[in-house]
Image (cartoon, coloured by chain):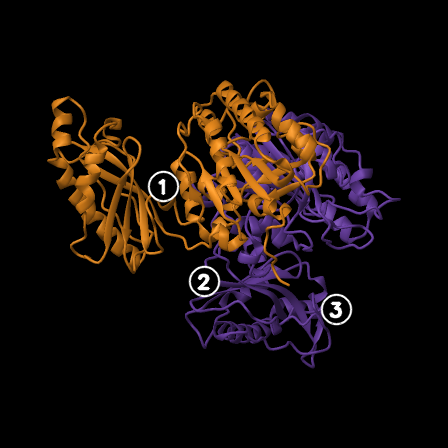
Chain colours: A purple, B orange
Amino acid sequence: MKTIMIVTDGLGGRPTDIDGKTCLQVAETPEIDDLLARRGTGGLMDPIANGVRPGSDTAHLSLFGYDPYEYYTGRGVFEAAGIGMDLTENDVCFRTNFATIDSNGNIADRRAGRISESQDELEEALADLESEKFPEVEVRFKRSTQHRGALCLRGPELGGNVSPTDPHELGIPIPESSGQDEKSKKTASILNEVTQQARKILDKHPVNEQREKEGKLPANAILSRGSAKYPELPSVEEKYGVTSSVIAAGALYIGVARVAGMAFKQVEGATGTVDSNILNKAKKSVDELEKGKDMVFLHFKGADNASHDQDAEAKTKYIEKVDDTIGWLKKNTDWESTHLSFAGDHSSPIQYGDHVADPVPVMITGPNVRRDELKTFDEYSCMKGGLGRFSGNLLPMTLSYSNQLPKFGA
Amino acid sequence: MKTIMIVTDGLGGRPTDIDGKTCLQVAETPEIDDLLARRGTGGLMDPIANGVRPGSDTAHLSLFGYDPYEYYTGRGVFEAAGIGMDLTENDVCFRTNFATIDSNGNIADRRAGRISESQDELEEALADLESEKFPEVEVRFKRSTQHRGALCLRGPELGGNVSPTDPHELGIPIPESSGQDEKSKKTASILNEVTQQARKILDKHPVNEQREKEGKLPANAILSRGSAKYPELPSVEEKYGVTSSVIAAGALYIGVARVAGMAFKQVEGATGTVDSNILNKAKKSVDELEKGKDMVFLHFKGADNASHDQDAEAKTKYIEKVDDTIGWLKKNTDWESTHLSFAGDHSSPIQYGDHVADPVPVMITGPNVRRDELKTFDEYSCMKGGLGRFSGNLLPMTLSYSNQLPKFGA
């Protein structure tokens, strides 16, 4: 049997979204409703636990069955894994920005004018970053979209409890990083060394000379934040005995899934925004299952973008696009042998524009499921769903229906 | 007030059991339904947690209120306690089989032809087992039904993380046990010594000479598995302040309950199969309460046997037998002062024939209970029950209704 777990980021809403209704209530979702009514059962899920306001990274860990209080070390490691860096338990990772430092040595722009060209050349110039104090530590930098990137330090005895060099403030010098414990002090000292080195390398780089000529802000520094030591979590295959792929566009989601051992598959046109070609993502999911994977984690990001933009119409339309895509999946999958679970990773009401702790609607559909009486899928109908209210662990719950879960005990 | 906690092993099912219904839905259970409708409230319980596929041992720990992630060390200790061995925190225990080794020294049968006679004489012969390397360690062997038994090593500095000498394979010699840490290496070394000693003792034992004459497979070795160090858990009386007895037939369930400090009471005709005299078990439960015990844990095993046999009819009939027995209990108990909770320890759907993570139906009945509107007890009706969905801890939940639960905090 096969499993598709779909997470629509920020799916849950509040009655303040649109005239007393949530975007999910307003959206026309005939395909999702039909799947629930004919093959599924619904409920409400606290992504992490009731009363916990989830981040997207901690929520996804929890949905995959990893206790984030045990395994979450910080965001850097997921961003680094998400942009394709290979990591080991000896890595400490940071999210980075290309930034602009002015002639007084102060931060003038945290995003180097949202630099959108020649970042590859800058990345190449930073390939020689190294620690003179600790030459055994490997220093790696990789750019991502626009000003974004990741920095990883690999070596023994490195701690991850390190303060950022990105102060989220302008007009001040880059702050020195400091570490909370002996191992983290070592990491902080290397980060400070590398930050200075990068300043020197970037300052006189031809790309920046050219940018200044064109009146653009130079990308003459990297700022680091989200320090995280690689968490040693058992892979999804070790935990549950299934092979899996992740189909997503956002680096963070790809990263969490890769760290959990899922294979990442690139999809043309997948952008992580409301305009993403999510039909292509559905097609790639079916491909992966047909090529032999037991499970696909399919992530749709646009609903959360629209929530952060406080754009109820965009969110509603995006949910309808997800519904169309699920309609395509229904036509192109063997439902007699496929389980599909569908949920948000957190609620993101329009009026607030950020994550809240309200539980998210969830459904599990497919053979073996005890069906409830729900006919429509939203935050209100799911209050009466057969799954009741539960916390996280959506992946193992779904896998149990295909009899693919190892037993705990005898 | 008195408490009876009834667990019907493997009670929960799936719509694939019988024509779209579960065995519990198909079974006629007028007594259970009446008890729920008039005196109770229902719900769905994840025996351990949502998305966790329970073993019977871990599930029972969790139902009694012990976190199995903290207390579960392995099955051996419960099997040993279940067949009546007295244990201390210095014991490491194994489940054993009498087995047959051929003339080449290879395992020919893991169950010595399911030996069914003279095991007492073999047990007696093994009373002298001892470690020459560690004479301070006490070695104890006890037979159980057929080929089954338990081996306990008692001594200081013994670890429980030890590989089995039962390879679950034929045609190979008995494998050497190895330990994961220093203390467990000591245990493994003693286990290997004792396994060789048992070979020598059994090989020339008159019982085996006689068996060979009769063309039966000799029981000339013991194979050990399920290594477990005794878990130091507070007793039910220490935790909840109640005295208690266990009425069960399966060694595993008796064992978990005994380790939790419940007194075991033997019942004539209780076999742990669908044919068991479960009415006698109900009678013994009432006896125990009348003799002064606060609580009885009453375990019915047959539903799980039928589930493992994938026999829907046998499971349905067994559930009806349980219903009759509850009818007897209702007539022979003072319901104004008795709480009865009723649940499965896990779901075991017929089509799969093994444990799954689907939650189990549960009800708590008796005075003080806030009654819901349920009229029938099954996996579907309980979706709407007043208890909602919760994880484990059924025993303390039930005890609270009789105002017998200690306060956490002030």
Which numbered disc flags the more N-terminal residue, 3 or 2?
A: 2
- Residue A114 relative to residue A190: left or right: right
- Residue A97 relative to residue B106: left or right: right
Label 1 Cα neighbours within 10 Å, binned few <14 / some 14-19 / many ≥20: many
Label 2 Cα neighbours within 10 Å, binned few <14 / some 14-19 / many ≥20: many
Three-letter residue code for mark 2 = Asn
Three-letter residue code for mark 3 = Gly
Does dot 1 land on a helix, a strand or a loop?
A: helix
Near-viewer residue (B121 or A24):
B121
Can residue A368 be seen here? The reply is: no
| Contact between labelled residues 1 and 3, with CB atoms less than 8 Å apart | no
Provide the residue designation for mark 2: A90
Near-viewer residue (A83 or B211):
B211
Q: Determine the CA span between mark 3 and mark 2.
A: 41 Å
- The quadrant in which residue B155 appears is bottom left
Q: Determine the CA span between mark 2 and mark 1.
A: 42 Å
Chain letter of the residue carrying label 3: A
| Contact between labelled residues 2 and 3, with CB atoms less than 8 Å apart | no
Same chain shared by disc 3 and disc 1: no
Provide the residue designation for mark 3: A215
Provide the residue designation for mark 1: B79
| Contact between labelled residues 1 and 2, with CB atoms less than 8 Å apart | no
Chain letter of the residue carrying label 2: A
Does dot 3 land on a helix, a strand or a loop?
A: loop
Q: Is residue A196 above or below residue B362?
A: below
Outermost bottom residue: A104
x%, y% of residue B25?
61, 23
Q: Is residue B24 above or below residue B62?
A: above
Q: Quadrant of the C terminus of chain A?
A: top left
Three-letter residue code for mark 1 = Glu
Q: Determine the CA span between mark 3 and mark 1.
A: 79 Å
Same chain shared by disc 2 and disc 1: no
